[in-house]
Every structure is written in C-alpha cells, then in structure tokens.
Amino acid sequence: MKKFILFLMVATLSATKAFALNVFTCEPEWKSLTEEITKDKADVYSATNASQDVHYIQAKPSLIAKIRKADMVVCSGAGLEVGWLPLVLRKAGSAKVQEGGENFIYAAQYVPTIEKPTRIDRADGDVHPEGNPHLHLNPYNMLKVGKVIADKLAVIDSENASFYVQNYNDFAAKMRSKIKNWEQKAAELKGTKAITNHVNMSYLFDWLKIKTIGTLEPKPGIPATSKHLSELKNLTEQNKIAFIAYAPFESAKPAEWLSQESGVNTIVLPYTIGGNKQVNNLFDLYEVSIDLMLSAKGK
Amino acid sequence: MSELLILLPALTIGLLMMLIHVPLGQEVLRRGIIFIDLTLAQLAAMGAIFASMLELGSFFSQAAALLCAFLGGIFFKTMEKHFKEIAEAVIGCTFVLSATLVVLVLSGNPHGAENINDILSGQLLFASWQNVAFAGTVFLSATVLVYTKPELFLKKYFYIVLACVITTSVQICGVYLVFASLIFPAVATSYMTDEHKRRLTEYAGESFGFIIGLIVSYYFDLPAGPAIVWGISLMMPVCLIMKVKQNN
C-alpha cells in the first residue's frame, strides 16, 4: 500500500513536471516569439498587454507568483523594465531565474541597440544608457533573440531540444521570406518623414528607413506641451510629413490636435501583439504596421 | 508671437467662464458653501469620466456629469437644511470618496492617470473652437440670467445654475481652476463695500491673472490649469496692499 502511494506521488510529480515548463516574459512580443518556438510545450506568460504603457507598470504580487514558477525569463532589457522587474525578482527570490543568470534573457544584450545617448542626464528626459529599448519592432532583432531563446530552451528542457530548434528554424525561414516581401512592399516608405508620440517606433522606422523628424513628447517621458506642439506645427509647414503615429496606450490628444492644425493624418500603430484586433502574432505586427503606414502615405 | 494664437481658444473660454464664475463665486462665499462648489466640481468630473468610459457619446457624458452634479447639489442642500452640524463634514467626505472612487475605477485603465490628471488640472491647452462654442454658450446664457434676474438665479435656482455651470467648466479647466476662479476674486475683494467697484476689481483681477497664468504656462511648459490658479492668486496680495492703502 505504501509503495502504491509512493508510486502515485512520484507519478503525479513527474506528470506535473512534464508540461510544467513556465516562461515568464515581460511584454507580449516576447510571449509571441517564445510561443513560436515552444508551441504547446510551455506555459508562456506575459506580464503586460498591448494596452499598457510598459514604462508605468506596477510591481504587483501576482507577478511575484509567476516569477517563482518560471523556468526562464525573456524581457527587453536596456532599462525598459527597471521600474518594476528588479523589485519583483527580489521579492520572488527564485533560484532558477536571476538577472544575469543562465535562464534570464534581456533581448537588448543580443541585438545592436540604436539611439545610445552620448550623455546621461535627467534633463534629457527618460533616456536609457544602453540605447532605445523598444527593439522588437525590427524583425531582424526577433530572429537574433529567437535563436537565443531556442538555444537556452534546448538546455533547460533537453528532452525537447530538437523540437525547439526545429520550430525556431521554421519560424526563421518564414520570417526571412516575409521580411523580403515587407521590404519590397515598404520600399516606397524609404525617406518618408513622420512624427511619433514617443521614441518607441524608432526600430520600425530605422528598419524601413523612415525619418522621425520630431516627437510629440518634447523629451522622452515628458507629456506634450503647448509650446512644443506649436514648434512641431512649424515643422509640418516646412516639411512634408506623411503621418503622425502613436500607440494604442498613448494619449490621442496631442496627436489629434497637431493633425487638426497641420492637416497631417494620424495613425495608431499597434506597437505589439494585440495592439489592434488584426495583430495576433509577430508576422501580423509588421504586416499591419506597414499597411497602415502605406495607406497613410497614400492619402 | 504668432504662436500665442494657439492660446486663443483657451483664453476665450477662460474669459467667458470668468463672466459667470465671478458672480457665482461671490454668492458661494456669501452663503459660506466653499467646499460644496469644490465637491460639486469633483462629482461632475467623476460623472463625466465614468460616462465617457462607457463610450456612449459626448451627449451622454454631459448628461451623466450634470446628473451627478444635480444629485450632489440636492444631497448637500438637504444636509444643510436638516443636518447642519455635520453638513460640512459630509461634504468633505463626499469629495474624498468621489476622488478615490475615480482612482480605483481607473486603476486598471491605460489612460487612467491621464484622465485623473485631466480632472484636476484640466485640458485648457487642448481646447478647440468647438469647446469654446459649447461652453461659451453655457457661460453666456448663465451670465445673462444671473445679471437680469438675480433674485431668481442667484437665490431660488442658485444650485441649479451652479451645477450646470460647474459641470461645463470643470471638464475644461479641472477642479482646481474651477475652485480658484470662483473663490479667489471674491475672497481677495471681500473687504470692498462698493458693489460696483468690487465687481470690476474681481473681473479685472481675474482676467489679468488668467492671462498671466496662461502665458507663463505656455512659455515654461507648465500645465495651464494649475499655472492659472497661481496667476489668479496674485489678486490676493495685490488687493491686500490696496486695502492697507485704503485704511491709511
């Protein structure tokens, strides 16, 4: 009888371990990328959703519980999560995932970041020393980070290593072919001038060679002011601006005001998975963003 | 200098609002119901925000805001009449309850912090000519009523007029500026006995304060509502000096 109970216990333990690969991601884009690789073999959680501004996340107790369960963490890094993640990690005190540890991925460490500041001064607004952290908007970066995720998963869950590697290869092949399409489609966007709310669209524009000639925020993190908006209005008179872009979680007011004053169209770029109803995965994200920009330019 | 044209809608709304806020504010001071007007503004703002979250159109939002202000007004009038000893306390409690309810309801909302800030500091700098038309009509009508038939609109129907006006002004100027533009001029000139002189001083002082506050907020990138509050507050030391001179 004792042996039977022991057997049951061991069986349940190993059964729960079988589909207990838990990945904690900070943002929906990393959840989506991870799931391309893990498919149904892991429970992937995203700490934030598309309607949230990731700069203003609160360290909630529920996040601590999720970190405790996590076998791996994937976040953007470059200071994007510095307002809440270190606190959550400290409180969770997990042996498996620690900043700098093997099962912890800060995407920024594996890709070339842009807009590294030459000086660090609060007067410049909310600037990240390691460069602009909104790096998921360049699909080439996703290819690089995806490989890192697949390699680490192959070590954490070696039983399924070939599964993860195969999924990554399939994902990468599809992505590379789509990138070719997108770059062709978006060729006419090269050199286009745009205004964004914050510097969070930089990687998308850097990839497609679109020029941001100004942001609605006078400095990163500082809300639009009247004087700055009137300076931007002057800019729209001197330059042909194709569109004013902002994200779903950002205030529409400054953008709509400038649009009314200048006649330039506004577009709401989804920014991440779930940003609008049509964006359900990474492929949608770039596809829909390019379509929105093309149609705005066309008007 | 032409950039200042951007401030024209805000300035127009501000001056039109001042036309009615000054006489209403003086009456508020006379009746000693200072915190009622603060709480009514907060209730109207709360009604507007919750209604706009339901996304049923701006008419619905306005109606909801007005309803909250009316209900608040009726509630406070009843308190004043039947429970005078605790009336002030109840008004204060209502203010805090309304403000914290907004925080709680908006805590999960991505635009929550921005909306809360708008209730308090207002959105003057984004005022459009459409806002001017709507709000201006409300303010001008109320002004006409209050000056032509004060015995009716500053007495019997006072709370109704107050609720309607404040509901409109709080959504543009925020709770703080609504309070300041109602009360500051009346308080600053409270020593004056000549009614005409007092009214002129109130209008002159508030216009001046409003313009200074607006221009400062523009050039120093400061939120307009709070900056104008301080602009209008300049009336107080100025009037104090005038009073001291008058006594001597």
Image (cartoon, helix red, strand yellow):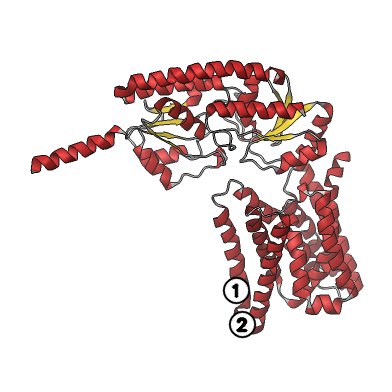
Q: Identify the mark at residue A120; answer none if there is no mark.
A: none
Q: At numbered mark 1, what does the secondary structure look like: helix, strand or loop?
A: helix
The residue pinned by badge 1 equals B90
Residue at 82%, 63% (x, y): give it. B138
Label 1 or label 2, whichever comes before in sequence order: 2
| Most foreground residue, B75 or A132 | B75
Looking at the picture, how far across and down is residue B220, in whole percent?
76, 43
- Viewed as shown, does residue B218 lie left or right of A90? right
Q: The residue marked by circle 2 belongs to what chain?
A: B
CA distance separating discs 1 and 2: 10 Å
Rendered image quadrant of residue B233 = bottom right
Q: Residue at x 80, y 71 (%)?
A: B26
Q: In the picture provided, is A71 more to the left or to the right than A107?
A: left
Instruction: Say if mark 1 contacts mark 2, CB within 8 Å.
Output: yes
Quarter of the figure that contains the C terminus of chain A: top right
Pick the residue in front: B129 or A107. Answer: B129
Number of numbered discs overlaid on the protein picture: 2
- Residue type indicated by callout 2: Phe
- Is residue A119 visible in the rendered image? The answer is no
Residue A251 vs residue B189, the one in the foreground = A251
Question: Which amino acid lies under the numbered mark 1 shown in the image of this protein?
Answer: Val
